[in-house]
Image: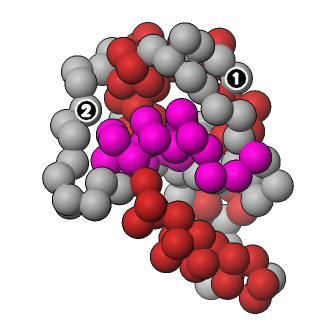
Amino acid sequence: MKHLGLTIAALITVVLPAIWPASGQQIPAPAGNADNGKKLFRETGCYQCHGLAGQGAVMTGPHVSRTELPFDAFLNQLRHPANQMPPYEAAVVSDQDAADIYAYVRQMPPPRDPNSIPLLKTTR
């Protein structure tokens, strides 16, 4: 478990600076259609690794729900993945489709409070 934490920390410090523009200027996201993004998230197979709720999993793909990544970093990761994710070139997922997926994952509902799920409710 400690190894996983170190791996994640290393990725954050090495990979994220590489995908953000050096100038610090962020490209604003084009207007995206979250409804179309939801459809594309399923059709292009994003859910297969990131989960239907964008929750991700250690062995398949990171959490993407309510992402804080700027659009340009999101698009760069989509086009030039850092890990085992296949690249989604513009011929497969256009910039507008990427903006729609981005709009969808940014507005996904937050996860439920575990205490609101009877089976997981902790007693104190």
Amino acid type assigned to the residue bearing label 2 in the image: Ala
Q: Residues within 10 Å of mark 2 (few under 14, many from 20)?
A: some
Q: Which mark, residue 45?
A: 1
Residue type beneath disc 1: Gly
Q: Is mark 2 on a helix, strand or loop?
A: loop
Residue 14 in percent (x, y) is at: 52, 72
Q: Name the spot of residue 74 as percent of width and height, x first.
A: 43, 42
The question of residue 69 being in magenta is answered with: yes
Please indicate, yes or no, whether residue 92 appears anywhere in the rendered image.
yes
Seen in the image, is 104 located left or right of residue 70?
right
Placement of 27 over or under 39, stated as above or below: below
**Which residue in the protein does label 2 denote?**
29
Q: In the displayed structure, would residue 60 be above or below residue 99?
A: below
Task: Report which quarter residue 124 is drawn in.
Answer: bottom right
For the residue labelled by badge 1, is the local secondary structure a helix, a strand or a loop? loop
Q: Residue at x 76, y 59 (%)?
A: 58
Residue 9's spot in the image, x, y percent? 58, 79
Q: What stretch is highlighted in magenta?
A: 64-84
Residue 117 shown left or right of residue 100 in the figure: right
Q: Closest to the observer: 28 or 114?
A: 28
> Are circles 2 and 1 on residues that touch, CB within 8 Å?
no
Mark 2 or mark 1: which is in front?
2
